[in-house]
Image (cartoon, grey):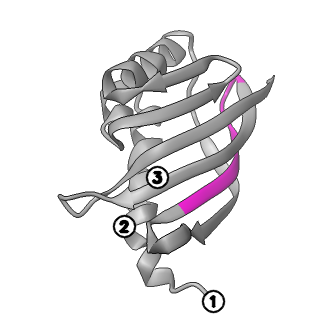
C-alpha cells in the first residue's frame, strides 16, 4: 500500500498545474515542468523544454480552452524509486481525453515537476 504522505509534493505539483491552467497562466503551467521535459500531446505533436511547452499551453488557452479537471486519478511509484507516475481522465470546457503518463520527480528545490508528460485529446465537448 502506498504511503499517502509520500504523494504530498506530487499532488501539490499537479494542483499547481491545474490552478495555473484554470487561471489561464501558461507560464505557470510551464513552470511545473522540469527544464528539458518532453511533452507528447496527441494529436498535436511533441514539445521539448519549458519555452515550447509554454507556447503550446498558451495557444490552447488562446483558443478558449479552460476549466480542466481530472478524474480516475491513479498514482504509482516509478521504477527505481524515481518519483511517481500519474494517469487519469481529464475534461475541459471544450474537450476531453486521457493522461497516459505524467512522470513527476522531486527537483533540486524540493518541488515535484514533470519530467515526462503524455496525454491525448479524445474528443470535443
On residue 104, the disc is none
Asked if residue 90 is among those painted magenta in the image, a careful observer would answer: yes
Quarter of the image where the C terminus is located = top right
Q: Residues within 10 Å of mark 1 (few under 14, many from 20)?
A: few
Q: Mark 1: which secondary structure?
A: loop
Q: Please provide percent x and percent y for residue 37.
A: 40, 37
Q: Residue 9, which numbered label?
A: 2
Q: Residue 116 at x, y = what percent?
A: 49, 44
At horizontal 61% and vertical 39% (from top left) the residue drawn is: 118
Q: Which mark is residue 14?
A: 3
CA separation in Å, label 1 and label 2: 18 Å
Q: Which residue is mark 1?
A: 1
Kindly indicate the quadrant of the structure image that contains residue 6.
bottom left
Secondary structure category for the residue under label 2: helix
Q: Residue at x 37, y 26 (%)?
A: 26
Q: Main secondary structure of the magenta part?
A: strand
Where residue 89 appears, as percent x and y from the top left, is 73, 47
The answer for how far apart the CA atoms under marks 1 and 3 are is 21 Å
Residue stretch rendered in magenta on the structure: 85-94
Instruction: Tell whether label 3 touches label 1 (CB within 8 Å).
Output: no
Q: Spatial distance from mark 3 to mark 2, Cα to Cα?
A: 9 Å
* First reached walking from the N terminus: tag 1 or tag 2: 1
Against 43, residue 7 (above or below) is: below
Amino acid at each position: 500500500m502506498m504511503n499517502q504522505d509520500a504523494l504530498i509534493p506530487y499532488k501539490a505539483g499537479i494542483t499547481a498545474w491545474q490552478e495555473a491552467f484554470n487561471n489561464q497562466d501558461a507560464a505557470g503551467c510551464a513552470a511545473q515542468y522540469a527544464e528539458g521535459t518532453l511533452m507528447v500531446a496527441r494529436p498535436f505533436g511533441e514539445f521539448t523544454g519549458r519555452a515550447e511547452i509554454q507556447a503550446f499551453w498558451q495557444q490552447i488557452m488562446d483558443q478558449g480552452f479552460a476549466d480542466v479537471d481530472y478524474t480516475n486519478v491513479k498514482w504509482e511509484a516509478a521504477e527505481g524509486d524515481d518519483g511517481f507516475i500519474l494517469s487519469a481522465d481529464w475534461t475541459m470546457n471544450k474537450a476531453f481525453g486521457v493522461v497516459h503518463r505524467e512522470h513527476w520527480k522531486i527537483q533540486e528545490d524540493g518541488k515535484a515537476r514533470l519530467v515526462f508528460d503524455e496525454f491525448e485529446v479524445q474528443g470535443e465537448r
